[in-house]
Image (spheres, rainbow, N blue to C red):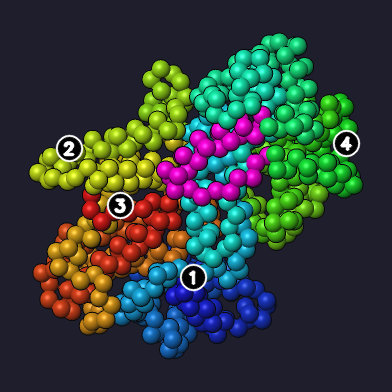
Amino acid sequence: MLQVVQQLDAQLQAAMAAAFPTVVASGQPLDPQLVPASRPEFGDLQANAALALARPLGQKPRAIAEAIVAQLLQDQAFTALCLPPEIAGPGFINLTLRPERLAAEVQARLGDPRLGVPETAAPATVIVDFSSPNIAKEMHVGHLRSTIIGDCLARVLEFRGNRVLRLNHVGDWGTQFGMLITHLKQVAPEALTTADSVDLGDLVAFYREAKQRFDSDGAFQATAREEVVRLQGGDADSLRAWGLLCDQSRREFQQIYDRLDIRLNERGESFYNPLLPAVVADLRSAGLLVEDDGAQVVFLEGVSGKDGRPMPLIVQKSDGGFNYATTDLAAIRHRLDADGAGRVIYVTDAGQASHFAAVFQVARRAGWIGDDHRIDHVPFGLVQGDDGKKLKTRSGDTVRLKDLLDEAVERATADLQRRLTDEGRHEDEAFITQVATTVGLAAVKYADLSTNRITNYQFSFDRMLALTGNTAPYLLYAVVRIAGIARRGGDLAATAGPALSFSEPQEWALIRELLRFDTVVVEVEHELLPNRLCSYLFELSQSFNRFYDQVPVLKADDPARSSRLALCRLTADTLRLGLSLLGIPTLERM
Ligand code: ARG
């Protein structure tokens, strides 16, 4: 309906201009204030402009609305699009699209693989920085959230026709390697020279030990620091050890990405190492760099610390080393400059909000971020257990992602087997594996995407795997239901046939829902909120189920039968496309 709304907006503007030439002459903009109708019985859309014009015109809003409507009724393009408008309350103009226009929109979408979603008029290079786990550490649920949300945003941006670079900013550089290599040299030197001589679980444990020693043992700390210097200076042995450690983690990460069907290009922190000195030089020549306690810092505007002094962003430590922020400064500079990105999106937990605000501020003041760049930190809340506390295993350990995904699939398998028994169905092993894997992983992704990402989110297998409610199984089941109609003789592929004809309120409700898809996708692209798409797909499934429960489809006669089949097909297509933008594949049977 994006196009229809645009047409209506233009028609309303023209009507307002014709009714109130003085406003146009005064140079005031004429905004029809067109919004979706607040209730279905008010029609499809409403224009609220009359209320805003009351004061400048010195007239009653209702009279203004009447004058606008009088003009609209003279516009043939408008009367072909809408029924005669109604004026409600103090002066809202309620607009109802003509049923034949809605049917024509449905017809147009039946042959359109994009289902009405236009390609963006201004495609850009967009960088989505997501997932970004740390080498030699376990990838945790926070990284899982980043992975799922980032992938969805990348898919939506790609579908809109942007060139999307999916960057995995892995933590593969810095002091942690100094500690780890120093420790391994003493306790497991083979790990530094031979691939896979320890597994990642052990590596994580070694890292924990190394960190403990680093924090408590001064001599160890000094050696570890020397080790970092060696690594950053390009020492061959250090680099080889570092390479082995990275490879090992990388392969573990890749297993998770493969299972979840996530594509990512690794461009870790180490990539920016050679670019760090230029960052410092640039900030110095921009006059932003100040020496503070031996460190090179930029004092942040509008952010003050406990002592009331502006907070510094440390760019180079007093020992000459660089940090997380320096790397992000180098990254943003490189992305805008060398990659030519018009938009950069960072998907991390909300805890990093002040880090990114600081980095963006400095990049802006340095002149790297221009007026036409759009830079967003896309924050998300914590993942909590059923009990509302941080997600942990029963023994109190952090949950490993592999175990979490395994459990989702196991539970989906058990649910499925129970249902098959209840329904007296027999299915083979391959079917069960495929359905349970799809449902289990879909449930994990959907549960994450369907909550407003900014709030914390309670992880519950029971809730995410339920067949009712706003869940992946509920949506997948709607697709399966429609596929079942085809198996029972409904020709869903027919494109030609008698002209569409609709009569039932359930049909119109479903049509109106179907036609919102394009608006919702564009909204997600702008607002970066996947839960909007989830809510939409849920409401669409509900409308479909109401329609299908209450209106006969296969038993109806033409043209009602083929028109209703067309709605079934468009619903399935919309659910499939919508779910694919969430990174969720669908099933024909379940
Ligand atoms: N590695 C970081 C972490 O685990 C996330 C990196 C996010 N991206 C960035 N450009 N800073 O918290």
Residue 347, magenta (yes or no): no
Q: How far across and how far down the image is residue 136, in percent? A: 58, 28
Instruction: Find residue 208 and report its horizontal and vertical position in percent.
Output: 58, 19
Which residue is label 4 attached to?
A: 290
Closer to the chain start, of discs 2 and 1, is: 1
Check disc 3 and report the residue beneath it.
475
Question: Where is the N terminus found, in terms of image quarters?
Answer: bottom left
Disc 4 residue crowd, few under 14, some 14–19, many 20+, Cα 10 Å: some
Q: CA distance from mark 3 to mark 4?
A: 56 Å
Q: In this orientation, does residue 542 appear? A: no
Q: Say if the magenta span includes residue 259.
A: yes
Under mark 4, the amino acid is Val
Q: Main secondary structure of the magenta part?
A: helix
Mark 2–mark 1 contact, CB under 8 Å?
no
Label 3 Cα neighbours within 10 Å, binned few <14 / some 14-19 / many ≥20: many
Q: Secondary structure at mark 2?
A: helix
Q: Nearer the viewer, residue 362 or 404?
A: 404
Residue tagged 2: 418
Which residue lies at the image location 42% right of the left edge and 33% below the top edge? 402
Which amino acid lies under the numbered mark 3 shown in the image of this protein?
Leu
Q: Position of residue 235 (x, y in %)?
A: 77, 31
Q: Secondary structure at mark 4?
A: strand
Dot 3 or dot 1: first in sequence order is 1
At 71% from the left and 32% from the top, the residue drawn is: 239
Under mark 2, the amino acid is Arg
State the separation of the CA atoms marked 3 and 1: 24 Å
